[in-house]
Image (tube, grey):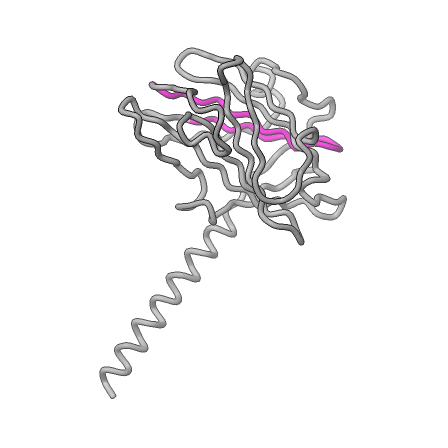
Amino acid sequence: MTKKLVKTGFLLLFLLLVMETLSVAATTSFKAVRVDDGLHGALPEQVWAEKTAAYDFSLPGGLRIRLYTGFDQEHLYLGFSVKDPFLTFQDDFSLDFQGSDHLRLSFWPPDSDPVTLYLLPSSKIKEPLLNISGAFWRQASVEVWSIPVQHGYFLTVAIALANLGVTPGQREIPVQIGVNEISSTGEAKTYWLFGKGPQDFATLLLSL
């Protein structure tokens, strides 16, 4: 009887820890602010700093990210100022750019399959590239720009809110952001800004 009670206690404790972990992942939130005149184009980072909300992240290996968030009537705008002591963009042919430094944005639109955007800041043709995996999104509804900076890059993306299922009464967008980093020895590792993996997420709130 005692052994059964001990096993039951451990099982309940495990379930509570799992539920707590899921709850933390689901309730972490951050905001995007309204931008009346939009943020299309490869604008200087200073403009984004003046018009949007900003969040800083420090990751292993000297990797630092500043995330900018904004939106208007039709688009969600995300800007990424990435500082990385070692960068390579050799893999511009695979679907997930695994062999290059790049960003991964995952969304969970309502009543739809999860969708991941793979954003490559530069390529052999000197332009950012975009691959979409998961739900059926038209490439034309996502626009990407990238500017090289010292020891890093500044990348921006505009995503049609219609893709995300955002309606006038719906102001929450589940999102996960991954930074795929290639070391000087060629080792690839993805760091996640929210939680511990691609299935975790934070809730992006569109602030009126």
Q: Nearer the viewer, residue 177 or 97?
A: 97
Q: Is residue 114 left or right of residue 101?
A: right
Which residue is farthest front?
A: 93
Relative image position of residue 55 (x, y in whole percent): 49, 31
Q: Is residue 165 above or below residue 73?
A: below
Q: State yes or no: residue 108 in magenta.
A: no
Relative image position of residue 191 (x, y in whole percent): 39, 36
| Quadrant of image for the C terminus | top right
Q: Is residue 9 above or below residue 150?
A: below
Residue range highlighted in magenta = 65-85
- Magenta stretch, main secondary structure, is strand
Relative image position of residue 199 (x, y in whole percent): 47, 49
Determine which quarter of the picture holds residue 171: top right
State how many labels appear. 0
Q: Is residue 9 left or right of residue 50?
A: left
| Quadrant of image for the N terminus | bottom left
Which residue is farthest bottom?
A: 1
Determine which quarter of the picture holds residue 49: top right
Q: Is residue 29 left or right of residue 138?
A: left
Relative image position of residue 72 (x, y in whole percent): 72, 30
Q: Nearer the viewer, residue 196 or 35?
A: 196
